Amino acid sequence: MSEEQIAGEELIGEVAHYFDHVGAAVLALNTQLQVGETIHIKGYTTDLIQQVESMQIDHADVQQAGPGEDAAILVSDRVREGDEVYRVP
């Protein structure tokens, strides 16, 4: 895991799947996430910080997703299944 962690980050889920042909990640969430929030995806070789610009559940655009939902977002770099997803304050 990455040694770099931003103060106050909150673990909100993990990457359940990555679609490299479209640059999208499916996030398995354990708390609410909203469009516009900044996330930090960290893993063995992953260290990506970006704003959530759009989100989909079952191919439908949504503004937020909650615990137990799998939300798809576009990501600016490759991520991997099992990477941890943190909310950046």
Image (cartoon, grey):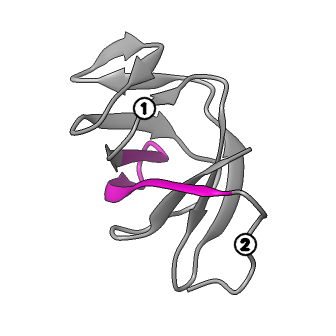
Q: Is residue 38 magenta?
A: no
Q: Quadrant of residue 10?
A: bottom right
Image location (x, y in percent) of residue 82: 34, 70
Q: Quadrant of residue 89?
A: top right
Residue at image location 37% in from the left, 23% down from the top: 56
Residue occupying the far front of the picture: 8
Residue at image location 37% in from the left, 36% down from the top: 72
Question: Which three-letter amino acid code belongs to the residue tagged 1?
Answer: Gln
Residue at image location 61% in from the left, 33% down from the top: 52
Image location (x, y in percent) of residue 78: 54, 62
Task: Please identify the dominant SS of the magenta region.
Answer: strand
Q: Nearer the viewer, residue 65 or 81?
A: 65
**Residue 2 vertical placement versus 54 (above, below):** below
Which residue was labeled with disc 2? 5
Dot 1 or dot 2: first in sequence order is: 2
Residue at image location 44% in from the left, 42% down from the top: 22
**Residue 57 vertical placement versus 79 (above, below):** above
Q: Nearer the viewer, residue 63 or 87?
A: 87
Dot 2 crowding, Cα within 10 Å, few <14, some 14–19, many 20+: few
Question: Which three-letter amino acid code belongs to the residue tagged 2?
Answer: Gln
Secondary structure, mark 1, is loop
Which residue was labeled with disc 1? 32
Say which mark, if any, is on residue 55.
none
**Residue 65 vertical placement versus 10 (above, below):** above
Q: Is residue 33 left or right of residue 50?
A: left
Secondary structure, mark 2, is loop
Which quadrant would the N terminus be assigned to in this image?
bottom right
Tell me which segment is drawn in magenta: 9-26
Q: Quadrant of residue 41?
A: bottom right
Q: Is residue 24 magenta?
A: yes
